[in-house]
Amino acid sequence: MRLIISAAVTGLMSAPALAGSAAISVDIPRLNVAEYHRPYVAFWIESKDGSKIENLAVWYDLKLKDNEGNKWLKDMRQWWRRTGRELTMPMDGLSTPTRPPGTHKLTFKSAAKPLSQLSAGEYVLVVEAAREVGGRELLRLPFQWPPAATATVEAKGENELGAITLTLTP
Amino acid sequence: MKSNIKLAFIAASALTLLAVPANAHRAWLLPSATVLSGNDLWVTVDAAISNDLFYFEHHPMRLDGLAVTAPDGSAAKTENMATGRYRSTFDLKLDQPGTYKIAVLNQGAFARYKLDGQDKRWRGPADEIATKIPTNATDVRITQSQGRIETFVTTGKPTEAVFKTTGQGLELVPVTHPNNLLAGEEAKFKLVLDGQPAAGLEVEVVPGGIRYRDQLNSIKVKTDESGTFAVKWPTPGMYWLSASVQDDKATIKEAKRRASYTATVEVLPP
């Protein structure tokens, strides 16, 4: 929640012109396994050629003693390699606790960071989930920025992630 | 008569074969993890000499020449070192963020000579050879070995400080960081001999898990003039890299020098 609030505040301070946003809806599937841990999930945007990366959110066990939850951050292998290992976690506005199975929504204002950092072009929303004693799954949702009209991009995971919808509003 | 000659031939080739096994076996270090995040981190490392990778089924590796370099270049301490029947093992606490180098250096000499018409062999530290070979020995052939066996582990962001070379023997200079390898991608490394590019050297790259397949599936590549070679990793897993060179640059008089380099690297799935 802190993420959305801080994004909104920054949005107010900078350019109020655009009321656009990017909304992500993500399903965390309920799994019938003996030992279940909520997945670590990273959301980030990368330019088509991978040269530019903007982190959106990282769900992980940030409340464990002595940051012990950081130990499994590297299991989101691609995120770790692309950007995670460069960061000091927890990070304000980025780290949030893990979420239970169900549908979760995240909204980012176009006028606020990190979306305001994007120049016009082709991008990919990447969602990577890794679960302790479980599997890993990564989904890529390509999109054009900024959106000319309301656009929806969908992807569906098979194991660790359910349906993901990215809704772009100009 | 004819069969006698044949027998002699067989005996001779058997002898040559006997001398080889030390090279035919593979020496390796196997870390429990190569890419880590968080704090209070440890890795445990197995060290062995075996036929198949990475199974300890032959000899434990001697760890006399073990040296671990921390990301800041200082020497890191190992703990819980033990040598069992088939493997040696030790733990390493990763106190600093960055890349650690775990290396075993073997400096030795191997001599063959004749004494009173009999073939003799001696193996030991290079500096003892002068005193260990009888002065009346004939047909003395000495090989001085400079072996370097390495692996790397990284917590957080990969760093470069541990790749500083010593200028002695065969060493690896990464172009691609060895803790940043992905299946399907190409990685480049450079080999240097006494600090100079090791050109035209054959490098053998063998994927682990040999026991569960019929073919070795090794990749053989050659270094170019700058000592650089490239490997495209076919699958994720642990890989064993090895190269060696023989020349006349031994510090022992009239000896040949055999310099070798071996590393274990982990390739992650994309």
Image (cartoon, grey):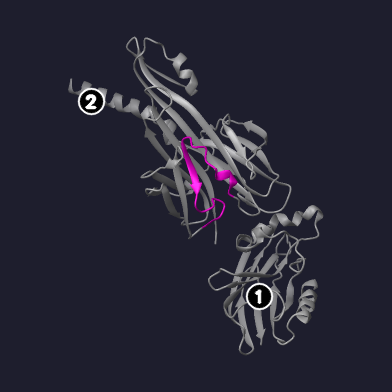
CA–CA distance in space, label 1 to label 2: 80 Å
Query: Which three-letter amino acid code belongs to the residue tagged 1?
Result: Gln
Chain for numbered disc 2? B
Is residue B52 among the parts visible in the rendering? no
Q: Quadrant of the N terminus of chain B?
A: top left
Question: Marks 1 and 2: CB-CB under 8 Å?
Answer: no
Which SS class for mark 1? helix
Is residue B18 among the parts visible in the rendering? yes
Viewer-nearest residue: B251 or B215: B251
Residue A90 position within the rendered picture, expressed as x and y whole percent measured from the top left: 76, 61
Residue B6: give its label.
2
* Magenta region: B160-182
Query: Which three-letter amino acid code belongs to the residue tagged 2?
Result: Lys
Residue A114 position (above or below residue A147)? above
Judge whether residue B157 is colored magenta.
no
Residue A35 position within the rendered picture, expressed as x and y whole percent measured from the top left: 73, 59
Viewer-nearest residue: B158 or A37: B158
Disc 1 designates what residue? Answer: A117
Query: Is B246 left or right of A14, judged from the image as shown?
Result: left
Query: Is A53 left or right of B240, judged from the image as shown?
Result: right
Which SS class for mark 2? helix
Residue B190 position within the rendered picture, expressed as x and y whole percent measured from the top left: 45, 47
Residue A115 position (above or below residue B230)? below
